[in-house]
Amino acid sequence: MRIDGACNSACEDFVEPFHASHRGVLVGETTNGSSGQPYMFDFGNGMSFRVSTKRYYLPDGAPFEGVGIKPDVEVKPSLADWKTGRDPVLARALELAGQ
């Protein structure tokens, strides 16, 4: 399963059971580490403030909020990969799947 820093909130809720049960291999980058339930205060001058309203932990007791879920196999695409349309995360996942 592909993960990266854009995975947060419901995405992390979906990914976490695969991580905890080892029923899937997570490939890519660490997730965002956000419950997706912040308290937001708007100062009314163009500035706002957000803070997490929940403290989540992973099933093993490790912190989650602000930390995220680490992949089993870390693969970080480079700018050159994006420019050339190459997807090293998908390539590594296919390699792991034996394809």
Image: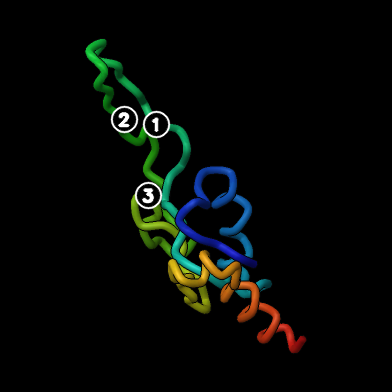
Quick one: label 2 or label 3, which is nearer the N terminus? 2
Secondary structure of residue under mark 3? loop
Closer mark to the observer between disc 2 and disc 3: 2
Alpha carbon distance from label 1 to label 3: 11 Å
Residue at 47% across / 76% down in the picture?
74
Secondary structure of residue under mark 2? strand
Give the residue type at disc 1.
Pro
Q: Do the residues labelled 2 and 3 touch (CB within 8 Å)?
A: no
Would residue 21 appear left or right of 29 to someone viewing this image?
right
> Which quadrant of the figure has residue 34?
top left
Looking at the image, which is closer to me, 29 or 82? 82
Q: Name the residue under label 2.
A: 50
Q: Is residue 59 above or below residue 12?
A: below
Looking at the image, which is closer to me, 80 or 50? 80
Give the residue type at disc 3.
Glu
Looking at the image, which is closer to me, 44 or 16? 44
Give the residue type at disc 2.
Arg
Quick one: label 1 or label 3, which is nearer the N terminus? 1
Instruction: Tell me if mark 3 has few (under 14), some (14-19) or many (20+) residues whose alpha carbon lies within 10 angstroms of its own.
Output: some
Alpha carbon distance from label 2 to label 1: 6 Å
The answer to whether residue 40 shows anywhere in this view is yes
Q: Mark 3 points at which residue?
A: 65
